[in-house]
Structure formats: structure tokens, C-alpha cells
Image (tube, rainbow, N blue to C red):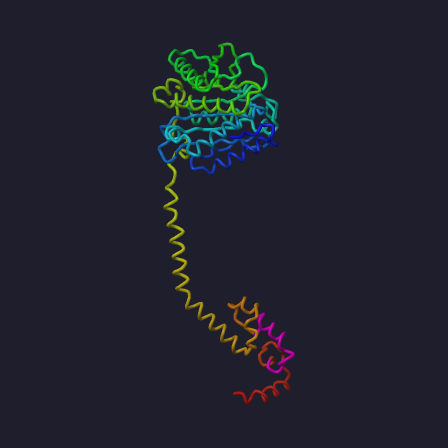
């Protein structure tokens, strides 16, 4: 598969939104209410699952990308991963999980290809204070969905002190929680060729994964080396995401050990998104078919009336004694349903066309024309013999 370089996009936000629109056509995708940025861009968010099966007990996963608008590969890779889900590449996963995706947390930053948002705030330093609309929007999703697993996808755009290709876990104090978090990260690291990094207790706690880790969620940060090839990044992100999901969705026991905060989830709060999909379109076929049959029957029932009208029209047409040549006139045929009266356009047209040739006859037909007494007498004399 050939991937186009990120720099080739004129506006990465619009390109990503086009992909979201395509994804939304899939029966596996349900759009969540979108957020709104400072520059009035939409912050897309959607859930992916097999909605034919019961979703209330499934493992809930949140994947975020695009916090830093100059890190375009995570957004591209996450959307590519979503596409692979919608074309049935991981059906078993969709049977067990509801995957919620916010591919561009910072839409204005992505549109401008800059790290900060439109009010110069770094969203990934704002998860404690929640001063920006971007963080409040995602925080609302987390509070509602209480995900078992949170994955925040980034890329290094400058040299880092820690290994560039890495999976980072927040500092965990509880024994079993910490063990489970490290075990899942180790597996993901092995599968995706990422170094495992555990942040120190003194590290900035306002980052996404650190904040939600402290709140009792299984939260991970994925990073890739500065200048890394997109294809390599893409493989790393996807392998790590799949591995983490497998670890958390593996058993209900594991997910509650790793993400105790997720236990507070109430399906009723998002029941509209978890409801089973409506029946297959196969049954929808009968509706239009029955309507068509009803229309045909109605048309058959109305046919005698239609004939009657045509007959009336024809009689009037003949009574007008119009030149047969005119019956093939395209205007007359086009208005075949319009009866001819003294005021109708056909009558006016006939008068205009035939008056110079048969003026006397025209006078007898034209009810609108005022006749002088002399003309009437003359006319009566001429027509008396006809009856
Ligand atoms: Zn970043």
C-alpha cells in the first residue's frame, strides 16, 4: 500500500473529515455528538462496533489522536485502523468491543499544522484544569463512557530524551493494577517494537494518559521516533493498539483490575448508541414493493375515469371541427388532457391559425366574439340548411 506524505495534504483537517464521512456510511460506525473548536471546526467522534450484538457488556476502548496539530501521522493511522475495522478485518474485535475514536482532538491545530490550539494552549498539558474546549469535550466522553482502555497516539517531531518509539504508562502505585498495566504494555511493546516507558512520580501529571491513569483508568501513550517513516509508524501504532485491546478485552477480570474507574459505567447513559441495529434491509424491500403494487391497482381502478375524460375531450375536439391535420400538432398532443373551451388556449390558437381561411366558421365557434345584429342574421341564413 502506498501512503502519501503528510505534507502533501493542503488541509489535513478537511482530508480527515472526508474520511470520517466515508466511515460514517458503515453500519459498524455510529457518530457521537461532535465537539466544536474555537474556530468553529467540528471535532469528530464516533463509536465502532458490531451493533447487531449486545453492546452493553462489551469492552469500551477510547482512542485519541491529533492533540498536537503538527503530529499528523497518528490521525492518519488511526483513521486507517478504523477503516480496516469497518471492512471486516477484525470482526472478532467488534463482537467484543465498542471502540470510541476522537481522531482530531485539536481540529484547529490540525488544520494549521501547529502543535497548539487556536488560543495557543497545549491540550496535552490541560487534562487537570480542563481550561480548553478540546479537553472538556473529550473529558465529557470519558465521563460518559468510562472506557476500560484509553490510548493517546502521538509522534515525536523533535529529538527526545526517552526512546522515540515507545509505549508509556502512567506511574501506578497499586500492586495488581501496576502489574496488569505493565504486562499489557510489555506485550504491546513486543508486538509493535516499542520501548516500554513508565513515567516518574515527579513527571507532569497534566498529560492525558497520566491524568486518567491517576483517576483509575488503563491509559497509555504511544510515541514514535522523530523522522520515522509513516509506514513503520503506522505498523507500530496498529500493532500496539490491537495488542492493548486484546489484553484488556481478554477477560472481564483483567479489564476491571486495569481500569477500576470503568466500573462506574451505566449503559443507560448511552443506551441510544448501544441499541441493536435495526433489522436488515432485506425486510425493507417489502415496503416499496407493496407501495408499487398499490399504485398499479389504483391506476387500474382510475382508468375508466381517465378514459371518460379523454372521450369528453375528443368529443369536444371533434365538435370544434378542427382540421385533422392539427391532431398531430405537437402542442395539441402535449395538452391532450385539457378540454377545449371557448376560452382555452387551443381555441385561441385555432382561431389565430384558421381565421383567415375560414372566417365564417370561426365566428360560429367563437363564443367570445361579439357579433353585430347584421352578422347574426347573415350567419343564421348560412347555417340554417345545415341542421
Ligand atoms: Zn504530541
Residue at the image position 49 percent from the left and 19 percent from the top: 221
Residue at the image position 52 percent from the left and 34 percent from the top: 19
Residue farthest to the front, as pictured = 1
Front-lying residue, 226 or 48 = 226
Vertical placement of residue 200 versus 269, above or below: above
Q: Count of labels shown?
A: 0
Vertical placement of residue 23 versus 359, above or below: above
Per the rendered image, the range of residues in magenta is 342-361
Residue 350 falls within the magenta-colored stretch: yes
Instruction: Name the image quarter holding residue 334.
Output: bottom right
Front-lying residue, 373 or 306 = 306
Q: Residue 352, image x and y in percent? A: 63, 74
Residue at the image position 51 percent from the left and 75 percent from the top: 316
Vertical placement of residue 137 versus 278, above or below: above
Residue 193 falls within the magenta-colored stretch: no
Front-lying residue, 226 or 216 = 226
Q: Residue 376, image x and y in percent? A: 61, 85
Residue at the image position 37 percent from the left and 45 percent from the top: 282
Q: Main secondary structure of the magenta part?
A: helix
Q: Residue 208, image x and y in percent? A: 50, 20
Front-lying residue, 74 or 36 = 74
Q: Residue 63, image x and y in percent? A: 47, 25
Amino acid at each position: 500500500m502506498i501512503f502519501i506524505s503528510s505534507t502533501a495534504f493542503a488541509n489535513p483537517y478537511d482530508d480527515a473529515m472526508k474520511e470520517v464521512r466515508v466511515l460514517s456510511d458503515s453500519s459498524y460506525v455510529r457518530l457521537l455528538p461532535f465537539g466544536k473548536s474555537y474556530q468553529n471546526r467540528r471535532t469528530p467522534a464516533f463509536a465502532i462496533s458490531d451493533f447487531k450484538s449486545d453492546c452493553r457488556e462489551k469492552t469500551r476502548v477510547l482512542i485519541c489522536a491529533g492533540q498536537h496539530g503538527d503530529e499528523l501521522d497518528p490521525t492518519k493511522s488511526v483513521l486507517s485502523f478504523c477503516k480496516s475495522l469497518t471492512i471486516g478485518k477484525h470482526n472478532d474485535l467488534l463482537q467484543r468491543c465498542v471502540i470510541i475514536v476522537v481522531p482530531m482532538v485539536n481540529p484547529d491545530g490540525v488544520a494549521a499544522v501547529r502543535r497548539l490550539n487556536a488560543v495557543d494552549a497545549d491540550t496535552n498539558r490541560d487534562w487537570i484544569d480542563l481550561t480548553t474546549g478540546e479537553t472538556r469535550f473529550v473529558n465529557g466522553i470519558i465521563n460518559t463512557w468510562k472506557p476500560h482502555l484509553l490510548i493517546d497516539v502521538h509522534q515525536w517531531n523533535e529529538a527526545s530524551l526517552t526512546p522515540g518509539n515507545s509505549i508509556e504508562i502512567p506511574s501506578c502505585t497499586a500492586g495488581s493494577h501496576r502489574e496488569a498495566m505493565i504486562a499489557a504494555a510489555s506485550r504491546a511493546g513486543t508486538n509493535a517494537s516499542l520501548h516500554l516507558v513508565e513515567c516518574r512520580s515527579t513527571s507532569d501529571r497534566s498529560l492525558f494518559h497520566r491524568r486518567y491513569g491517576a483517576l483509575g483508568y488503563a491509559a497509555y501513550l504511544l510515541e514514535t521516533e522523530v523522522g520515522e517513516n509513516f509506514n513503520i509508524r503506522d505498523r507500530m501504532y496498529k500493532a500496539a493498539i490491537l495488542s492493548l485491546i486484546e489484553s484488556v478485552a481478554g477477560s472481564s477480570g483483567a479489564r476491571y483490575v486495569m481500569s477500576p474507574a470503568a466500573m462506574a459505567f451505566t449503559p443507560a447513559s448511552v443506551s441510544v448508541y448501544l441499541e441493536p441495529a435495526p433489522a436488515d434491509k432485506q425486510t425493507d424491500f417489502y415496503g416499496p414493493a407493496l407501495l408499487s403494487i398499490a399504485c398499479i391497482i389504483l391506476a387500474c381502478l382510475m382508468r375508466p375515469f381517465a378514459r371518460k375524460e379523454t372521450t369528453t375531450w375528443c368529443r369536444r375536439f371533434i365538435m370544434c371541427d378542427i382540421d385533422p391535420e392539427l391532431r398531430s400538432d405537437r402542442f395539441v398532443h402535449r395538452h391532450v388532457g385539457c378540454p377545449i373551451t371557448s376560452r382555452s388556449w387551443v381555441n385561441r390558437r385555432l382561431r389565430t391559425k384558421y381565421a383567415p381561411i375560414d372566417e365564417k366558421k370561426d365566428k360560429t365557434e367563437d363564443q367570445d366574439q361579439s357579433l353585430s345584429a347584421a352578422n347574426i342574421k347573415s350567419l343564421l341564413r348560412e347555417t340554417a340548411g345545415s341542421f
